[in-house]
Image: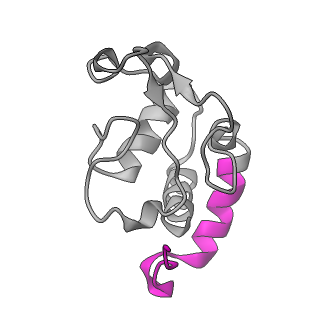
Amino acid sequence: MLQPPPPNSYDHSAAQRGKSVFNGHAQCSTCHVPPLFTEPGWNMHTADEIGVDDFQASRAPDDRYRTSPLKGLWTHTKGGFYHDGRFASLMDVVNHYDSFKSLHLSGQEKRDLVEYLKSL
């Protein structure tokens, strides 16, 4: 069973603000639904739907990427983030979605969102 992250491993107040960004402006909760923070039912997406090439998806039987569960994301201590592990940091993932989905998140919203992701 996963243990929660150490209390000093993320900024609690920033994580609270990030939760609002996650559920609102950033639209993360559209696919990453609590309690596991993945999609219930069919959780597969084409490369075009998530804004990347299909290099890894084309190796799967259905040519799709799975919506990664975010619960316990804090256990990752280095790289390997996103559907296929292509991003080195959570901020890289946030920047990708900000650009791909034209979210126009502020720098503070991005930092708060990363803190929330670390708290899951």
Image coords of residue 36 (percent x, y): 62, 54
26 w.r.t. 16: above or below: above
Quadrant containing the C terminus in the rendered view: bottom right
Name which residue lies at 46% across and 84% down: 6
**Number of numbered markers:** 0
Which residue is the extreme one toward the front?
Answer: 61
Q: Is residue 36 above or below residue 64?
A: below
Range of residues picked out in magenta: 1-22
**85 sits left or right of 16 in the view:** left
Tell me, yes or no, whether the highlighted magenta stretch contains residue 13.
Answer: yes
Q: Nearer the viewer, residue 88 or 108?
A: 88
Q: Is residue 65 left or right of residue 81?
A: right
State the image coordinates of residue 79 (x, y, percent, origin top left).
26, 52
Q: Residue at x 28, y 19 (%)?
A: 59
Q: Point out residue 17 in the picture as x, y percentages from the top left corner.
A: 67, 63
Q: Nearer the viewer, residue 99 or 46?
A: 46
Residue 57 placement: quadrant: top left
Q: x, y percentage for residue 37?
A: 61, 50
Q: Is residue 103 magenta?
A: no
- Vertical position of residue 102 compared to residue 26: above or below: above
Residue at coordinates 41% horizontally, 42% vertically from top-left?
93
Q: Magenta region's main secondary structure?
A: helix
In which image quadrant can residue 19 be found?
A: bottom right
